[in-house]
Image (tube, rainbow, N blue to C red):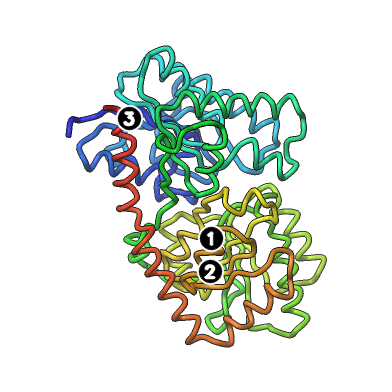
Amino acid sequence: MKKVKVLYFHQHFSTPKGSSGIRSYQMARNLVRNGHQVTMVCGSYGGGNTGLDTPFLKGKRTGQVDGISIIEFDLAYSNADSFVKRSLTFLKFAVKSIGIALRHNYDVVFATTTPLTAGIPGIFARWLRRKPFVFEVRDLWPELPKAMGVIKNPVVLGAMSLLEWLSYRSAHRCIGLSPGIVDGITSRGVSKERIELVPNGCDVEIFNQVEKHWRPEGICDNHFMAVFTGTHGQANGLCAVVAAAEVLQNRGREDIKIALVGDGKNKPQIQDMVRKKGLDNIVFHAPVPKQKLVGLMANADIGLQILANVPAFYYGTSPNKFFDYISAGLPVLNNYPGWLAGLIEQYDCGYAVAPDDAEAFADALEHAADNQRELKAKGQRARELAEQQFNRSDLANKWLNWVLGAAK
């Protein structure tokens, strides 16, 4: 196959040294392994680690990390930032990225959300330089923030809807990370022949490399430990975990502990809620790099896949944490309907409970704690699901063929 130069835009890019998802790192590494060239354009994400540590010069720094050429803009971003601050950071990144898209030497441009503004440099590349453009959609915007009530201004929603439509129509090909996302792209008038489903994958090799088992302080080896690893934001609906923990404490289940590992805008609010309720069965821990996360997962009993009860989430998301859990052979407790709940039920690799039902949530954790042999079998089936259907190397090859096909 001819060597292809890919210009890759992902504002929140991270290597495994960071505590955020590494999908883009793995996809870029697969391109490099197959003899292609990749330039990754990104910002400075709070939970990420680009691998670059040199000082910024005139607002950016560049370098090579694991064969990937990286252009990192000095645009700090955190999930704890206000909506206005995040929006300004998104727009600044888009403007700077346009300059790269118009000047850089490449064969195909690839852009992945979030944010939705990630598609802007691809639009310019398509129409001003006639470059092949592939657009990857990780969440449906503005549908999700609108459904959550995060964005209510009709002018802003209208502008985002226009940008969404323009990104889809400008792209030669699209990628959706869940069945609902593929359907959402189709509903905007894009033919299914131009869309490929490539969900988040399982880094089974990384989760085979356990260097040190560990648990957060306050959780002993004889405790049953449920873990949530991810953003503590409005979308994550962690109030459901607090409600279930209160039920468990009232039932006297002191043996069951819940570890909430991560950060986010709502974390102080959740911590305050736990303090006021006097709950001692929830332990908070700061985000950890993927390499350290492996040791935590290896010592956990069950993973928590939690989201707010928003119907748009049911089929329209592809959460990293779910795929990390099953990579580690952890059974999963999921608290909302949709395609992941369907997978859990179909493969009997965890528990799928109704949303906003603290009693059912607590019942599932009690059943898991009291039936260890059955739980281990669920974990084994979770690992089989990871290896057979969501192995990252297989999905990375599918992604590679789809993206490079646009370059032809």
Residue holding disc 2? 332
Q: Nearer the viewer, residue 340 or 278?
A: 340
Q: Is residue 392 above or below residue 1?
A: below
Q: Is residue 244 above or below residue 120?
A: below
Marks 3 and 1, how far apart in space? Answer: 30 Å
Residue 356 versus residue 168 in the image, above or below? below
Relative image position of residue 181 (x, y in whole percent): 53, 44
Tag 3 and tag 1, C-beta contact below 8 Å? no
Q: CA distance from mark 2 to mark 3?
A: 37 Å
Question: Residue under circle 1?
Answer: 340
* Structural crowding at the residue carrying mark 1, measured as other residues with C-alpha within 10 Å and reported as few (<14), some (14–19) or many (≥20): many
Q: Amino acid at mark 1?
A: Leu
CB under 8 Å between discs 2 and 1: yes
Return the residue at label 3. Answer: 406
* Closer to the eye: label 2 or 1: 1
- Does label 3 or label 1 sit earlier along the sequence? 1
Mark 2, other Cα within 10 Å: few <14 / some 14–19 / many ≥20:
many
N-terminal label among 2 and 3: 2
Residue, x 34% and y 64% (percent of image)? 387
SS category of the residue bearing label 3: helix
Q: Looking at the picture, which amino acid does disc 3 mark?
A: Ala
Q: Which picture quadrant has residue 407?
A: top left
Left or right: 262 as drawn, with respect to 110:
right
